[in-house]
Image (tube, helix red, strand yellow):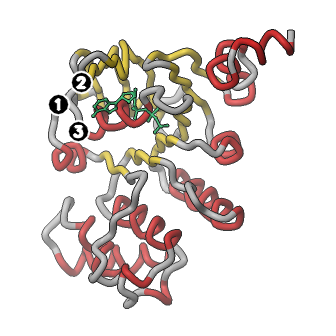
Amino acid sequence: MTTTILDVQGISKRFGGVQAVKDLSFSVGKGEILGLLGPNGAGKTTAFNMIAGYLRPDTGKVLFEGKDIAGKRPWDVCKAGIARTFQLSKPFGDLNVIENLMVGGFCRTGDRARIRERAEWMADFLGMGRQREAEANNLTAFDRRKLELGRALCTEPRLLLMDEVVAGATPSEAGEMVELVRRIRDMGISVLIVEHVMKVIMSLSDRVVVLDYGELIADGEPQRVVAEPRVLKAYFGERYVQSRA
Ligand SMILES: Nc1ncnc2c1ncn2[C@@H]1O[C@H](COP(=O)(O)OP(=O)(O)OP(=O)(O)O)[C@@H](O)[C@H]1O
């Protein structure tokens, strides 16, 4: 039986008149890759931000390894063992690859030698060994994205939250990212991933949960979930579902 690493229990968030997330519950198993799906505006980023400490939930609990982290600040969530990447990657432009990676390490320890060693290892892991000294400003968009991923990993997380990691990537870059995510999971890190590119989600996820208008509408094995009428309706509308009946 898989152990649960993250257990989200009934979280909600309202922005003025918009109920962005409503009574959302789901869990991530240890060693699992869970895909978070849903049409634009479904509440995925809001849910992410409540888990990562960027937004305080109006209701509910976020249990990480059994402890409620809801409402903790991002720095404390990171220290607890959760790292995240952002939709828009913003490395420190005038720092080089190793220096950017080292920034992540300071979340865990003040030991510069250990941080540097991990950053060097990470540059190789990302396939950026030859760009160690390159300034982030001079990297391609995809390399900046990988760098952001590496910076998150340098915080030594046990759960990684990834937001749209292949947006704007070429097919071969997307393939490279999929491989990296698999290797991250093989290192024992659980992954919660938001991604619009279906091919990526379907090939990576052990399980997916689907949101629509802030509510969970499906949770299960990817192939089965994407064929559910409720999910098809959320993505393509009622007429599409009726035309297939
Ligand atoms: N800070 C905010 N203030 C007001 N409304 C917000 C705020 N953040 C999100 N919303 C609204 O909450 C709803 C959910 O947005 P959210 O960004 O979480 O969806 P999403 O599923 O991540 O969408 P996308 O796939 O387009 O990134 C939307 O209606 C959005 O307009």
Question: Are dots 1 and 3 in contact, CB under 8 Å?
Answer: yes
Residue 132: quarter of image: bottom left
Gap between marks 1 and 3, in whole Å?
A: 6 Å
Q: Quadrant of the N terminus?
A: top right
Give the amino acid at mark 2: Pro
Q: Which residue has dot 1 on it?
A: 71
Q: Does label 2 point to a residue whose CB lies under 8 Å from ligand 1?
A: no
Question: Are dots 2 and 1 in contact, CB under 8 Å?
Answer: yes
Residue 173 sits above or below residue 132 on the image: above
Q: Which residue has dot 3 on it?
A: 53
- Pick the front one: 169 or 242: 242
Which element carries disc 1, helix, strand or loop?
loop
Determine the residue positioned at 53% across, 69% down.
142
Determine the residue positioned at 36% across, 22% down.
20
Residue 121 sits above or below residue 35 on the image: below
Which element carries disc 2, helix, strand or loop?
loop
Q: Does label 3 point to a residue whose CB lies under 8 Å from ligand 1?
A: no
Report x, y in % for residue 107.
Answer: 20, 60
Report x, y in % for residue 211.
Answer: 51, 23
Determine the residue positioned at 22% across, 43% down.
77
Residue 92 sits above or below residue 56 on the image: below
Gap between marks 2 and 1, in whole Å?
A: 7 Å
Q: Which residue has dot 2 on it?
A: 57
Circle 3: is it few (<14), some (14-19), or many (20+) Cα within 10 Å? many
